Amino acid sequence: MIIRPQTKEFLARLQEPRRTIQVIAGPRQVGKTTMIKQVLQTLSMPARFFNADGVNADDKDWIADRWNEARALQRFNKYPEMLLVIDEIHKIDNWSEQVKREWDADTFNDTNIKVVLLGSSRLLLKQGLTESLAGRFEIIPMGHWSFAEMQEAFGWDINQYIYYGGYPGSASYISNEARWRRYMRDAIVAPAIEKDVLQTTYIYKPALMHQLFLLGCAYSGELLSYNKMLGLLQNIGNATTLVNYLKVLGESKLLIGLPKYVMDTSRKYRTIPKLQVFNNGLLTALTDGVSFEKVYTNPQKWGRWVESAVGCYLLDKAEELECNLFYWRENNEEVDFILQKADRLLAIEVKSGKRQNNMGLSIFRNMYHPNHSLVVGGNAMPLEEFYRGNLEHLL
């Protein structure tokens, strides 16, 4: 059983006096509920765990009833403190207002019930937290599984991780790639789009959103202008619509359009985006006509998979380290990724099957003087070493 890095932080917060609601936030199938169950098995504090999945969304009393159960149990047993965990909280209509009412009542009455909330829809969690629970919560973000975790749990090598990504639930199917692809599309892609996006945010053109997601996954690691996207998509739209839809997909931790690094901040978000999935399993599952053998034995294709895999890792690290992630390009020279934290810059170039003679990193260093630069893959730093290192030391 893998113990994710967030577990230690979560346990430490539970040992603190009651101050804020703890929110476990992350994309689908990264182990949020599993972590909670692991903690509950080792925690000496009495706890109640409830799952809102399957509860009628308009049941206005469900949250209050569960909260009152916890209060009654605490008083009956004279527990000095109690832990209340509610999973899939976002599936209850107006959940944030109900949580606010019960939390504030406990605060007023000095009731020592600590609260943990989880949900598979990052968008709905964010919306409810910012609208009603401002100042009352802290987030523990959980990203996708790392190479080290997938290797420890399933014995994967670096090439399997690059191709299949970091979804632990899909690992048992990789011996049959067709079955693995069906699982990815049915168990991850479909609910992510249909539930986490379309049911949580008003999307004027859902068909366009879906097409954009499929296109973005297939082009992960590549620069694609909004006008070119519109030309490839079958549904009529405009660039502003695509910008907004990419923002929604990014907030859902599915797909993002990385902006170009420029000194003028106002120009950064008007540049051609570099499409980037949050998990390389999405690139593989939604690219037609590929197989591990076809991709791995084609240096140009494999180079794009490697670059996209590095981008997935950096997206997780950017959130963890509170950085911004960009790319840089001038004419035909480019740097694959730029991490920026305050006034510190880290430039990262990926060498694996393409652009072996790219001078972009040297040009970028002369122009912007980053604090550090790394070359990853090829004959430079091995990918395994890069994944196991600590980027925080460079920022």
Image: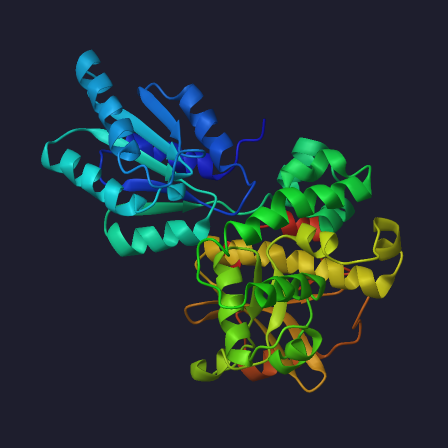
Image coordinates of residue 16 in percent, x first then y, are 26, 33
Q: Nearer the viewer, residue 267 or 394?
A: 267
The relative height of residue 252 versus residue 118 in the rendered view (above or below) is: below
Picture coordinates of residue 307 (x, y %)?
70, 62
Which quadrant is home to the N terminus?
Answer: top right
Confirm whether residue 390 shows in the render: no
Quarter of the image where one finds residue 99: top left
Q: Residue 250 vs residue 281: left or right?
A: left
Name the residue at 70% across, 75% down: 232
Residue 27 in view (yes/no):
yes
Is 155 above or below relative to 389?
A: above
> Up-down: is 199 above or below 101?
below
**Residue found at the very far left of the displayed protein:** 109
Residue toward you, 364 or 147: 147
Q: Position of residue 327 (x, y in %)?
A: 60, 72
Residue drawn at (34%, 18%) of the image = 44
The vertical placement of 162 against 266, above or below, is: above
Residue 148: where, in percent of width, then height? 64, 40
Indicate left or right for 56 with 311 as reference: left
Q: How many marks?
A: 0
Q: Foreground: 137 or 49?
A: 49
Residue at the extreme top of the image, as rendered: 77
- The coloring applied to the image is rainbow
Q: Quadrant of residue 312?
A: bottom right
Q: At 68% from the left edge and 73% from the top edge, which residue is drawn?
A: 234
